Amino acid sequence: MVIDSAALREMQAPLKEKYRNDPRAAVVTLRAHGDLADGAIACKVETGRALVEAGLHPATGGSGLEACSGDMLLEALVACAGVTLKAVATAIDFKLKGGSVSAEGDLDFRGTLGVDRAAPVGFRDIRLHFTLDTDEPEDKRANLLRLTERYCVVLQTLRNPPATTADIAVKG
């Protein structure tokens, strides 16, 4: 289904009005759930479309048969950035014929394996790249990127991490 800027505004107008009138209505709690695999070093994650089994990356001893959570994080960034770019392009009447989104990140597995306490656990650097099929001028492309960065939930979460807690409960 092709949506133009007028259709997008029409779709979002009642939501924007609702959120202006009741800011609490705009706060939605998203959830994810996984079950620890029996016998394997893996976690089965419900994605809403399929069950994905995540396991160790080969650089930490994994077989490579399971999904890597680091890859899944980059995939979430690509998905969010791609959808956000398309929505922004539609909203500002940016003529986009197509394109692609990619992300790559650098990990030092010495950190996660406990080989070097000074090595970081997690991504050191992440690079997000868009390749667009467009004839729009540089200033419009720069504006599209600026707005995409501003409104991409996953990118903003990575850049401005929220307070995050962890706990353990005992079953039963």
Image (tube, rainbow, N blue to C red):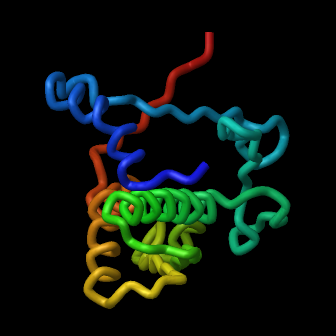
What residue is shown at x 55% (from left), y 78% (from top)?
A: 104
User: Is residue 19 at all visible to an observer of this figure?
Assistant: yes
Q: Where is residue 148, by image quadrant?
A: bottom left
Q: Give the mark count.
A: 0
In percent of the image, x 71 and y 43: which residue is there? Answer: 43
Front residue of 28 and 141: 141
- Of residue 26 and residue 165, the one placed in the foreground of this image is 26
Q: Position of residue 98 (x, y in %)?
A: 58, 74
Q: Nearer the viewer, residue 119 or 138?
A: 138
Residue at the (55%, 73%) spot, across then down: 101
- Pinpoint residue 53: horizontal percent, then vertical percent: 76, 47
Residue 133 in picture, x, y percent from top left: 54, 83
State the residue at coordinates (41%, 60%): 90
Residue 139 sits above or below residue 30 on the image:
below
Seen as rendered, the residue at the extreme left is 21
Q: Inspect this view and state whether residue 110 appears.
A: no
Q: Is residue 168 left or right of residue 50?
A: left
Residue 28 quadrant = top left
The answer to whether residue 92 is above or below residue 163 is: below
Rendering coords of residue 167 (x, y %) = 44, 32
Q: Would you identify the image quadrant in which residue 37 lies?
A: top right
From the image, which quarter does the C terminus lie in?
top right
Task: Say above or below: 107 vs 151.
Answer: below
Q: Is residue 131 left or right of residue 28?
A: right
